[in-house]
Image (cartoon, rainbow, N blue to C red):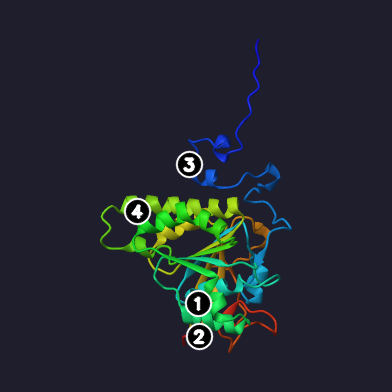
Amino acid sequence: MNCEHIRLSNARATYVNPKHPKAALLVEQPLRTFEGIRPRNAHLPAEEQILTTGIEKLDKLVQLATGQFVVFQGRAPSVSLAELLCVLAQLGDPIGLNSGAIFIDGGNSFDVYAASNYAIEYGIEPKLALSRIHISRAFTYFQLASLLTEKLPSALTHYSSKFAIVSDITELFQDPEIKDKQEAYRVFQRISHSLSAVAEITGSLVIATSFRQNTRSFDTALMQTAHTTILAEEHGTFTRFALVHHKSLPLRKASRREDRADQFLEDFMEGREWGEPSHLGGSSSTKNSRD
C-alpha cells in the first residue's frame, strides 16, 4: 500500500463540516483547542469575567458571565438597564468587563441621555463612554436576523468587545404587516440559537431584552436557548426581579412559592434610582425612576 503525506490547510473551513447548522458562524471564528470549549452546564472557569448590575442581591443570585446568553424580559425598567450595562461593561474588574459594547437596537430605543448620565455617575467622560458603544439599528426582522446571525460575530472581533446587547428583540416580529407569521417565528428561533452559539464560541456576554407583552411563543423560544432568563416586574413604584430560568443553576438552590416555581428577590430598597452605586448592602428590587 502506498502512503502519501498531505499537509492540511490551517484554514478554519478545513475543520468545519459544511452541513453543520452553524457552519457559517464556526468558519469565521479563530481555531481553538479542545480545552477552550466549555460544555453549557459546566461550572464557570476562572478566566470568565462577570458583569455586575449594581444590584447586589441580583448579582449574588445570578452571574452575568462571558460565554453566556442572558435574557431580560418584562416591562420598561429594563430599557434603562440596557444603557446602564453598556456603561458598566466599560469599567474594569470587579464591576465590568473593561470592554466596549455592541448595541443592536431592535426597537429604536437607545437613550443617549441615559447612557451619558450613567457614564457621569460612574466617573467616565460621556463622549468616551458613547464612543465605546457601537450601535446598529434594524427596521425589519430580516435586517435584525442579518445583523445577529451574520454581522455580530465579526463585530465582536473587530471592536475587541466582550459584550453585546440586543434591545427589544421581539419588537420587529410583531409588525402587523408581516404576512407569513410562521416564517417569522422560524427566523426568530434561528436568531435565538445563533445568539447562544455566538456567546459560547466567542466567549462574550450576549444579553437580549424583550419588553413586548403577549409574545409568549417568542419568549419561550428565548428561554429554550438562553443560559439565563430574568423577569422584571413592576410593583407600584418598584421593580422586582425573578430568576425564571437558569441552565446551570442546581435545582436545590432554587426556592419556590406556592403559586409558581420562580425564585424571587424580595428585599426592597427605597429611594435608589437605576444605576446608582450600592453602598449599604444589596437589593433585589429598585425604585422605578420614572414614577
Query: Of marks 2 and 3, which one's residue comes earlier in the chain?
Result: 3
How far apart marks 3 and 4 lie (CA) works out to 18 Å
Q: Are marks 1 and 3 in contact (CB under 8 Å)?
A: no
Q: Nearer the viewer, residue 131 or 221?
A: 131
Residue bearing the label numbered 2 = 289
* SS of the residue under disc 2: loop
Q: Residue shown at 50%/38% (left/top)?
A: 20
What's under tag 3, amino acid-wise?
Answer: Pro
Residue bearing the label numbered 3 = 21
What's under tag 4, amino acid-wise?
Answer: Ala
Whether residue 244 sits left or right of residue 215 in the image: it is: right
Query: Of marks 1 and 4, which one's residue comes earlier in the chain?
Result: 1
Report the disc number at residue 80. 1
Q: Nearer the viewer, residue 67 or 155?
A: 155
Query: Of marks 1 and 2, which one's residue comes earlier in the chain?
Result: 1
Q: Tally the marks.
A: 4
